[in-house]
Each structure stands twice: as C-alpha cells, then as structure tokens.
Amino acid sequence: MERHRSGIKFQPEDGDKVLLFGRITIYDARGEYQIVTESMEPRGLGALKKAFEQLKTKLEKKGYL
C-alpha cells in the first residue's frame, strides 16, 4: 500500500471498514497471495464520524463554531 497510493485518499486505522478495488496476485518468490489495491474507500459509521470530526475541526479553526 505504501508504494503507490494515488487511489488511496486516507490512512485506515485498525477496526476501520473499507471497500477495496484492485486485483489479487501471487507473489511467486514466496508463493503468497497479495492484494494490489487500486483504490480504497471508507465505509460504515466510522467513516461518517471521521468526516464529521474533520468538518467540525475545520469550522472551529475558521471561528464558525
């Protein structure tokens, strides 16, 4: 996820629900599966709460709240 993050607009935290778009590949050197993520979107109430908190902080900085 760290190599190329153009479609990833946020850093998920433990417990966050996300919707991933990408593909599953096999890493031949170790015979392991990996998910190559093209984009990631937050999902669930946690995403709404984060957006609310960000908006609240922005409005407080501008003196509206």
Image: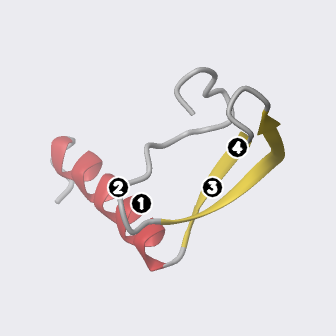
Residue at 48% in and 43% down: 10
Q: CA distance from mark 4 to mark 1?
A: 30 Å
Nearer mark to the viewer, of 2 and 3: 3
Q: Which mark is residue 51?
A: 1
Q: Earlier in the sequence, mark 4 or mark 1?
A: 4
Q: Tell me the kind of residue under disc 4.
A: Gln
| Residue 9, image x, y percentages | 55, 39
Decide: few, some or many residues near mark 1? Use Cα within 10 Å; few <14, some 14-19, many ≥20. few
Decide: few, some or many residues near mark 4? Use Cα within 10 Å; few <14, some 14-19, many ≥20. few
| Residue 4, image x, y percentages | 63, 22
Residue at 61% in and 28% down: 5
Q: Earlier in the sequence, mark 2 or mark 4?
A: 4
Q: Which mark is residue 41?
A: 3
Secondary structure, mark 1, is helix
Question: Seen in the image, is 39 located left or right of residue 54?
Answer: right
Secondary structure, mark 2, is helix
Question: Which of the 4 image quadrants contains residue 27?
Answer: top right
Q: Tell me the kind of residue under disc 3.
A: Glu
Q: Residue furthest top?
A: 3
Decide: few, some or many residues near mark 2? Use Cα within 10 Å; few <14, some 14-19, many ≥20. few
Secondary structure, mark 4, is strand
Q: Earlier in the sequence, mark 4 or mark 3?
A: 4
Q: Tell me the kind of residue under disc 1.
A: Ala
Q: Is residue 11 above or below residue 20?
A: above
Q: Are marks 1 and 2 in contact (CB under 8 Å)?
A: yes
Q: CA distance from mark 1 to mark 2?
A: 6 Å
According to the picture, the residue beneath numbered tag 2 turns out to be 55
